[in-house]
Image: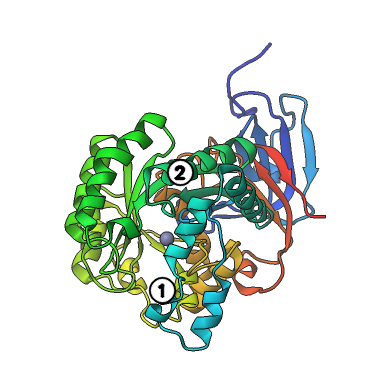
Amino acid sequence: MTTGPDSRNPFPGNIDRLFAHCRVATMANGTYGIIENAAIAVSGNKIAWIGPMNALPDSLPGKIEMTDCNNLWILPGFVDCHTHLIWAGSRSEEFEMRLAGASYADIANAGGGIFSTVTATRAADEQRLFDMASRRLSQFLSQGTTTVEIKSGYGLNLETELKMLAVAGRLKQAFPQHIEATFLGAHAVPPEFSGRSDAYIQEITQVILPKVKTQGIATAVDVFCENIAFSREQTRQVFDAAKDLGFDIKLHAEQLSDSDGTGLAAEMGALSCDHLEYLSDDSARKMADHGTVAVLLPGAFHYLNETRVPPVRLFRQLKIPMAVSTDLNPGSSPVFSMLPILNMACLRFGLTCEEALAGATFNGAAALGMTARKGSLTPGRDADFVIWDVDTPADLCYLSGITPLKQVVIGGQTVYLPD
Ligand SMILES: [Zn+2]
């Protein structure tokens, strides 16, 4: 006889797996939420129960596969909410040029910068892009990242933007991680529209975006609002079109100067605004009023040798959730793991370890509008978590040069074990 949940048996269905004798940081609501000597019961792809071992019911329903975690730590899998994971070509020469003192203009004149990535990405066929992106996504998995947002934006024309998003779709099928695809056609003005950025915005809103919608290959639309990219007014036009078509919106904003893209994005209901080094107090208040997540990208700050940090104290004061992300891209953040990003978020931006870890889990999920499924370990959420061989969760921010990862579980399945 089967019965519903009761006090003796709180499980709504059969239990498939039990992770016993672990220490857990649930990261629920963006705090550690530590449970010592804990157990996690998984039913299907969801967490059915989590709590101290001594509160486990005597008999559990179902044929259960048991994992003894030997007192290791379990945290939610990382949610990397801002990446440019699909590209072709390399920018390491540019890195060397910058170290030798070359300016942005020198690099552009030598054929470097974002347009070298655009040229290489346009030239690569879908299979080649897929193969290169697969290696990067495998690396993410080995570093404990279980949800990844991937942007287009190195095509800057209909054909290549669709090709990039098609690759994201294939990655979704081929990998266990959850992938959210974002259309970032407004990443830069393509060379063939040089001096005619309004015409390119029109191409995006009238031609490319409707195609992206018809093909159902992205859920959100992003824009780079900056003096070297698109204006606040152009951003508004893209967002208007995106919202009309039912996309979520988000913004690269206030990275190099204050264009008040953030104020606009917050008022238009953006999920997140990302970078934010030059954010004004006024725009921050708009984020607070509209529940916009601040996505901090310390990798780009570090690689570009920036000096102005985002207003972290103001975010705390206004209770604006802070996510952290790799911003994986070949130009300014070739970082394939959340672990160094956690370290940079603490040392360069002044986050506490708890804030950094919340940024890589719960608030990363908030930046994708997914806290009901991802980013914390509570009953009903997806069973996406990582077993770490560390003494404390803070070790994930503190240690450098090792990956103390023992197992990655996604949707209740073990999907990665290190050699
Ligand atoms: Zn970015």
Q: Amino acid at mark 2?
A: Ala
Q: Residue 289, can we see it?
A: no
Outermost residue to the right:
419
Residue found 50% across the figure and 65% down from its top? 356
The residue nearer to you, when weighing 193 against 45, is 193
Query: In which quadrant of the rendered view does residue 313 lie?
Result: bottom left
**Residue matched to label 1:** 108
**Residue matched to label 2:** 181
Question: Whole-percent x and y of residue 257?
Answer: 27, 73
Residue found 52% across the figure and 75% down from its top? 94
Check disc 2: other Cα within 10 Å, few if <14, some if 14-19, many if 20+: many
Q: Quadrant of the N terminus?
A: top right
What's the CA distance linking mark 2 and mark 1?
Answer: 28 Å
Tell me if 223 is positioned left or right of 366 in this view.
left
Q: Residue 210, can we see it?
A: yes
Residue found 56% across the figure and 81% down from its top? 96
Question: Whole-percent x and y of residue 15?
Answer: 69, 29
Question: Whole-percent x and y of residue 68?
Answer: 80, 46
* SS at mark 1 in the image: helix
Question: Whole-percent x and y of residue 281?
Answer: 22, 70
Query: In which quadrant of the rendered view does residue 371 lie?
Result: top left
Q: Quadrant of the C terminus?
A: bottom right
The residue nearer to you, when weighing 13 against 5, is 13
The residue nearer to you, when weighing 358 against 325, is 325
